[in-house]
Image (spheres, rainbow, N blue to C red):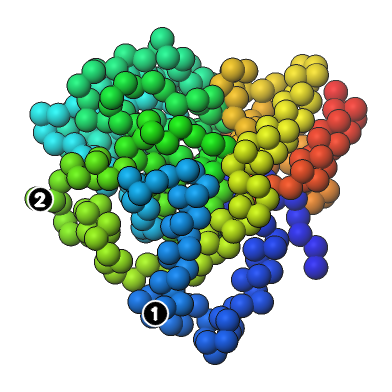
Amino acid sequence: MSRVHNFSAGPATLPLEVLEKAQSELTDYRGLGSSIMEISHRSPAYSEIDAQATERIKRLLGLDDAFTVLFLQGGASTQFMMAPYNFLSAGQTADYIDTGRWSDKAITEARRFGTVNTAFSSKESHYTRVPGQGDLNLSGDARYVHFTSNNTVVGTQFPTEPDTGDVPLVCDASSDILSRPIDVDKYGMIYAGAQKNLGPAGVTLVIIRNDFLEQAKVDDVPTILRYKTHAAKIFNTPPVFAVYLVNLVLEWIEGKGGLPYFESFNKKKATLLYNQIDSDDFYRGTADKDSRSTMNVTFRLPSEALEQKFLEEAKKENLVALKGHRSVGGIRASIYNACAHESVEALNRFMVDFRDHNG
Ligand code: PMP
């Protein structure tokens, strides 16, 4: 069996050890004579998986009992609507930092529920950067400040959380969750679709600080869309197999050394590629240098024809899923936690060769 060097932006490559473990347990989960997909989500076996995954998230992020961890469905896109549905009413303001396609979609949904103050937008300059603290035009009395910690399409990432004083941050961390330590005390809520750094598609991690959760609305919010419904108990059938796989990925992250390990591992991989991009002007990075992402490395070549050739020849070397997002074109190498150093080295070698033959 051969596995490709997979640079997919999401669903993204998973650790081989995790896939193999899932394979070995697939038809008979730990002596039950059934797979985990074929038993009740209220069974002891599944309850243990849910509890373990919750504890691992808390340990990895350094969350104490002041936080609630939920495994929901509907992808991060559902959270674009659910967060304002629960926390924003007509006459109230939420601040949104607009740093890319996904922030923009979150803003569109929030406007249905209350007033959105766009505290910063780099839309006019094609989202090539994230703001510095001085660029933020915060309203001061916002219910929350929403930001996208890593912008998957353009390849930018906040180097650190924006400072919003006492106003809680609500963060879409879909494309850099658990890739580095964060300052959890600044957050009221963090959400992430699992399919990049956490596991397969189909489950969305939502972390809410309990004092923020207290403020979530109940009236006029449909039962299944209330955070309080899910915080009280497992309300309906969760995506059991996805949560099971997330739990295995979390075990793998812990085994490697947790977030400090991944922070330096991810930086090392990204630096290799950015150094290559910066070595001359054949490759051109598309994000501003101080906004560059360690998760999605985006660049252009001198022409679209060369980009096409790059993708075709890369594929022959087993380097796949390097095409940039359809809205921006170019090349994008997504190098999340599970992307091996050897894969990035192979891409780096290919980039050198390709330039030698085409530059
Ligand atoms: N936010 C970010 C930062 C993303 O990268 C994506 C998906 N690529 C989404 C939200 C949307 O996620 P989903 O498809 O899970 O709704």
Is residue 271 among what the camera can see?
A: yes
* Quarter of image, res 102: top left
Q: Which of 316 and 127 is in front in this view?
A: 127
- Quadrant of image for the N terminus: bottom right
* Quarter of image, res 230: bottom left
**Above or below 197: residue 165:** above
**Above or below 342: residue 42:** below
Tag 2: residue type?
Asp
Is residue 331 among what the camera can see?
A: no
Residue at mark 2: 220
Label 2 neighbour load within 10 Å: few <14, some 14-19, many 20+: few
Q: Position of residue 171 (x, y in %)?
A: 39, 36
Q: Which residue is drawn at 41% across and 54% down?
A: 204
Q: Position of residue 18 (x, y in %)?
A: 65, 63
Label 1 neighbour load within 10 Å: few <14, some 14-19, many 20+: few
Comes first in the chain, label 1 or label 2: 1
Residue 152 numbered mark, or none: none
Secondary structure found at label 1: loop
Q: Residue at x 48, y 21 (%)?
A: 130
Q: Which of 223 and 167 is in front in this view?
A: 167
Q: Residue at x 46, y 77 (%)?
A: 45
Q: Residue at x 29, y 35 (%)?
A: 108
Secondary structure found at label 2: loop
Q: In this rendering, would 52 be left or right of 338?
A: left
Q: Are marks 1 and 2 in contact (CB under 8 Å)?
A: no
Residue at mark 1: 43
Q: Residue furthest bottom?
A: 33
Q: Which of 157 and 55 is in front in this view?
A: 55
Q: How far apart are marks 1 and 2 (CA)?
A: 32 Å
Tag 1: residue type?
Ser
Q: In this rendering, would 207 be left or right of 297?
A: left
